[in-house]
Amino acid sequence: MSDQELFDVISDARAHPEKYPPNGNASGAAMSPCANAFQLSPRLRDVARDHNTFLASRPIEWVNSDVNMHRGPSGKLVWEDGEPMSQAGYNTFRAEIVATGFPTAEAAVRFWMQDDAPWSWGHRNLILNCSVQEAGTGHHQGGSGGHYWTVDMGTR
């Protein structure tokens, strides 16, 4: 399992959302594919990798409560001004999706694409937001969550 595998699966989901039909009430779920693929951002990949390493150092109960899975070592959200995503040069648009515990990239992407109704399809809709230009992916195995999957997305 690798960062590249997650990037490939997320890119496939962006181009072929029909492979990932929403479970439950699909109201508000984006359904259209994006003609433009994500461009791989080494900067966002590094942010995603570092973020997963940080999350793996924390108890899984902390990671999975509230919005903690999006907080960095400073306690702020990684997409806030002055935090890792803005430090990487992304100032027009910044977003992040995180999943823990899934043993494969495919399982994490299926969760974001198909089982996102409790989050108002926010993860799915970010993947299918065709105006977002770049993404970086990270996978970390270890820590109390087992597997950490992060996709950081941005537009400079």
Image (cartoon, grey):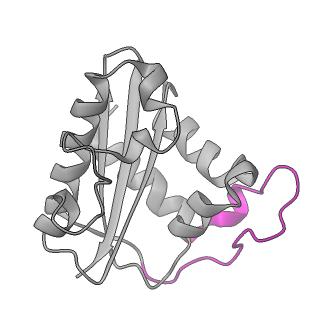
**In the displayed structure, does residue 127 sit left or right of residue 20?**
left
- Asked if the stretch drawn in magenta spans residue 32, the answer is yes
**In the displayed structure, does residue 113 sit left or right of residue 74?**
right
- Looking at the image, which residue is at 22% across and 63% down? 85
Image quadrant containing the N terminus: top left
Quarter location, residue 2 = top left
Q: Nearer the viewer, residue 102 or 25?
A: 25
- Looking at the image, which residue is at 67% across and 53% down? 119
Image location (x, y in percent) of residue 139: 32, 36
Q: Is residue 134 above or below residue 47?
A: below
The overriding secondary structure of the stretch rendered in magenta is: loop
How many numbered marks have been drawn onto this rendered protein structure? 0
Image location (x, y in percent) of residue 43: 14, 61
Q: Is residue 141 above or below residue 2?
A: above
Image quadrant containing the C terminus: bottom left
**In the displayed structure, does residue 12 sit left or right of residue 21?**
left
Image location (x, y in percent) of residue 10: 47, 56
- Asked if the stretch drawn in magenta spans residue 79, the answer is no
Single out the residue that lies furthest toward the right: 25
Quarter location, residue 88 = bottom left
**In the displayed structure, does residue 119 sit left or right of residue 52?**
right
Image location (x, y in percent) of residue 8: 40, 54
- Looking at the image, which residue is at 47% across and 45% down? 67
The segment highlighted magenta reads 15-36
- Looking at the image, which residue is at 77% across and 57% down? 21
Quarter location, residue 19 = bottom right
